[in-house]
Image (tube, coloured by chain):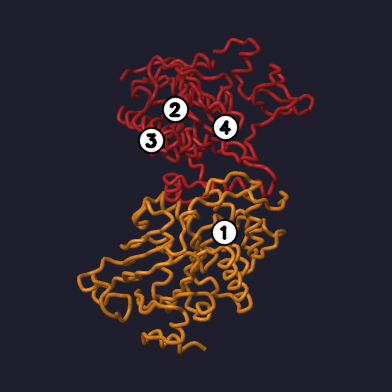
Chain colours: A red, B orange
Amino acid sequence: MEAARIEHPRPWMNRPAAAYNFAFLDEGSKREIRRKTLKAVAIPGYQVPFASRELPIARGWGTGGLQLTLSLLGPNDVVKVIDQGHDDSVNAVSIRRLIAETSGAATTEDTAKATLIQSRHRIPEERLRADQILVLQVPQPEPLRRVERSERLTRRKHAEMDYSAMWLALYEGIVRWGDITLGADYPVMVHGRYIMAPTPIPRWDNEKLHQAEHLTLFGAGREKKIYAVPPYTDVIPLQFEDYRFRKESFDGKACRHCGSTDTFLDETTDEATGLTVYQCSDTAFCRKRRGEELP
Amino acid sequence: MIQVTEHAAERAVPAWTARIRADEKLLEVRGLTKRYGPGCSSCHQPETGEWHSSRCPRCGTIWACRSLDFHLYPGEILGVVGESGSGKSTMVKCLYFDEEATSGEMTLSVCPGDGNLLQASSQRKRYVRNHLMGMVYQNPYLGLRMNFSSSGNVAEKLFAASQFHVGRVRRRAAELLERVEIPLARMDEPPARFSGGMQQRVQISRALANDPPILLLDEVTTGLDLSVQARVLDLIRSIRRELGVAMIVVSHDLGVIRMLADRTMVMRHGAIVEHGLTDQILEDPQHPYTQLLVHSLL
């Protein structure tokens, strides 16, 4: 336990950080979250219930991810927080400040320099390394929720590997619309055992979980669940033999800033011309590619 | 919409078919008991004596099934008759693992290694439900997903048997729905839009999806009008003739039993009071309750 003190630009925020425990949560809470995290790592794709703590941000705003980050954080960690690819959205900035102010940990926007990355709905374009941990915020951890409302029954379905209802949901999309209609949060099979919700990352990012070098942790604060994809784990999107999983296509489109054609692009409107333009969703990656120095 | 091409014979014959022998009991049930309540010392020997109801007068425990013994041969139709509350439906629900039996033994000759299936793991029970048995409920809302397509209802069973090729799954669904006279043009409509008779037929095609050797029919024709009833009964008979599926037909309607069943057992207050060949039961009933039942036939 150590107290952290950093200068805040807003003077009223400069009360002694020692009023908090290191990384905000008390040691008992952190230990419980770590213990549940270990269990999640031991059973890839299995949702481990945990006692989600109160935090100074509302449930459903990234508290699951934040609790994982705070429980894993050490004084030498370098933290990066992203919100749908952006380092500078309000939510990402608030969470980053909270982490920094209560722990004194260094922060960065450079994916390669971070040891701990908390993200909402995106996995960075740069491939993560074995010494990095990715923490994803989860709105709905239960992939079967769209076909089964009862928690008791979804748990039983997982236990018995009874996934025909999930396949039926995919089939219905094919019958109605001629193809698989699921977009983000595309369900995946983890190491041939559990169907898992990869959180609303675009289908583009699904392959970054498969046989990855890094550990990915998923925290759902409102739903009180932790789950994990350990390094070198199979993560295969659900697909039929004749209707395959496909990621988003950006054929003929390029980022308006860096010209990239191999990244996930956001569609936006150019305010001056009114035309539809595309830009990298991962802003840090885009800036790095343009040769900018990242903070 | 996806086109359904003519069906090709590309399905593998299920592994259990080789293990079926006509002279060997396909299903054997011994001492099947289902109790709702704790039971007491005066009702703990449920097989003894005639009861006046399935409820124990001392402790109020309901003995829905009291130590039932019966068997089923391949391709045979076993009828089960009895009044409401006699334990017929509870019995088939126990066989299909919808209800957990209190005690008893159930063996299938097609999976000899499993021993007593009532004690099997839930994974094993799931396998038996999906591959070896089909169930048709009285209320189609229990057996179908009303807001999913009819072909999807059949397909769900095929997914449960690990078939993940949409084209093949649809061909099989079309084949089955055609078999039960659902027009192919309506195969992707939800059963909620169908009439009661059609819903029952969709249920039957779903139950047949994985070519199970046993079909459980719980009051399938109850609540259907007479002409629709006749078509469903015709369908069941032709399925038995063509596919050789063994069936347990539960009904309170002796007409249905007369038309379908080879052998019949009569249940009352959770126990079997009489069993034998259907003709014998109907022409020469021995037990007073069976006599009452046969004589009250209009």
Using the image as rendered, state which of residue B71 and residue B92 is in the foreground.
Answer: B71
Residue A128 on image: x %, y %: 52, 19
Kindly identify which residue carries mark 1. B206
- Label 4 SS: loop
Q: CA distance from mark 4 to mark 1?
A: 36 Å
Q: CA distance from mark 1 to mark 3?
A: 46 Å
Q: CA distance from mark 2 to mark 1?
A: 39 Å
Using the image as rendered, state which of residue A228 and residue A170 is in the foreground.
Answer: A170
Kindly identify which residue carries mark 4. A201
Q: Residue at x 60, y 32 (%)?
A: A202
Q: Nearer the viewer, mark 2 or mark 3?
A: 2
Kindly identify which residue carries mark 3. A53
Badge 4 amino acid? Ile
Q: Is residue B186 left or right of residue A109?
A: right
Badge 1 amino acid? Arg
Residue B110 on image: x %, y %: 44, 56
Q: CA distance from mark 2 to mark 3?
A: 24 Å
Q: Residue at x 66, y 21 (%)?
A: A262
Circle 1 chain: B
